[in-house]
Image (tube, grey):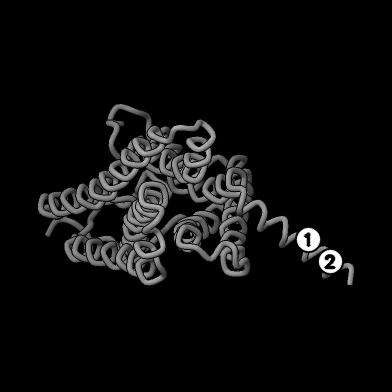
Amino acid sequence: RNHSLISEFILLGFGNDPKLQPLLFLLFLLIYNVTVAGNTLIIALVVVDHNLRTPMYYLLGNLSFLEICYTSAFLPRLLASLWTGDRSVSVKGCFVQLYFFAVMSATEALLLAAMSYDRYVAICHPLRYAALMNGRVCGRLVAGSWLCSFLNCTLTDVFLWQLTFCDAKEMDHFFCDFTPLIKLSCSDTRTLELVTLTIAALGALVPCVLTLTSYVCIISTVLRIPSSTGRKKAFSTCSSHLIVLSVFYGAVITVYVVPTGNAPTVLHKILSVFYIVLTPLINPIIYCLRNKEVQESLQKALFKLAAFRNR
């Protein structure tokens, strides 16, 4: 009764330096445009090129679509605050942003696990690949990834909407993350924290175990190939995916698993930028630079575009 309820938060972001804000705006605007353009290019190549209409690239196209949605959930709001200086966000808006952040993070982990399974079948069971990884199976994997993420995060969100916030309204972050959010609540958050920890642990542990199991089988199969050329060719088919997995799980572990209680807040923000902003930017670059089929498809598309302009 002695507290006044609040209806909005103030995201402190990256400070109030007037010289730094325009530079950050230009940097994040460039990153956002490149991320959307790169992932859109991947989707366009998968749709247009018949050679890329395989389960592997179908999953890659869905991952690129997810990265566009993922980036669009954060960067436009951050860009608006850097441009206008308005850092306020309503409590409901903060809940919505956190919800989509959780859904897309969980979906990305499941999609990467599905891509690992695709590589496992292709390398360990090549003769059964067409039967085990057809269009119906891929559609179910993608739909299951989204559905499981929505259901799990909705359960957590039910508890989240029951929180009340009073007095403190400044959140020392550039987006609505779970830990700084519950620190501002004047409700009992023990049940919410327990439910969130359980769901997050299962949502992260299950895809991680499935992915590790797939690559343990893949590596053991590749090592049994007698010729070095065959081993190199088999391993090259999943090298891009391995790099993406390393970047994704490395960022997740660094931001959310490694204890950073005594670390400066600015360090946690920088690590969060790497996880939320740079990971969607890096993925299409990795697949374009290290995947010969994508490179060939891109070259064909450029040649066709050049020929069309010459006409």
- Residue 205 or residue 3, whichever sits in front: 205
Instruction: Please rate how many residues cluster around mark 2, counting C-alpha atoms within 10 Å: few if below 14, some from 14 to 19, many from 20.
Output: few
Residue at 44 percent across and 41 percent down: it is 242
Q: Amino acid at mark 1?
A: Phe
Q: Are marks 1 and 2 in contact (CB under 8 Å)?
A: yes
Where's residue 207, x and y in %? 28, 50
Q: In this rendering, is residue 276 above or below 257?
A: below
Q: In this rendering, is residue 75 above or below 17?
A: below
In this figure, which residue is indicated by the disc labeled 1?
303
Where's residue 58, x and y in %? 48, 63
Number of the label disc, if any, that sits on residue 307: 2
Where's residue 251, x and y in %? 40, 39
Residue at 54 percent across and 45 percent down: it is 282
- For marks 1 and 2, give the CA distance: 6 Å
Asked if residue 303 lies left or right of residue 29, the reply is: right
Q: Residue furthest right?
A: 310
Where's residue 190, x and y in %? 11, 49
Let me know if residue 176 appears in the view: no
Q: Secondary structure at mark 1?
A: helix
Q: Amino acid at mark 2?
A: Ala
- What is the quadrant of residue 297 in the picture? bottom right
Residue at 37 percent across and 36 percent down: it is 219
Q: Residue furthest front?
A: 226
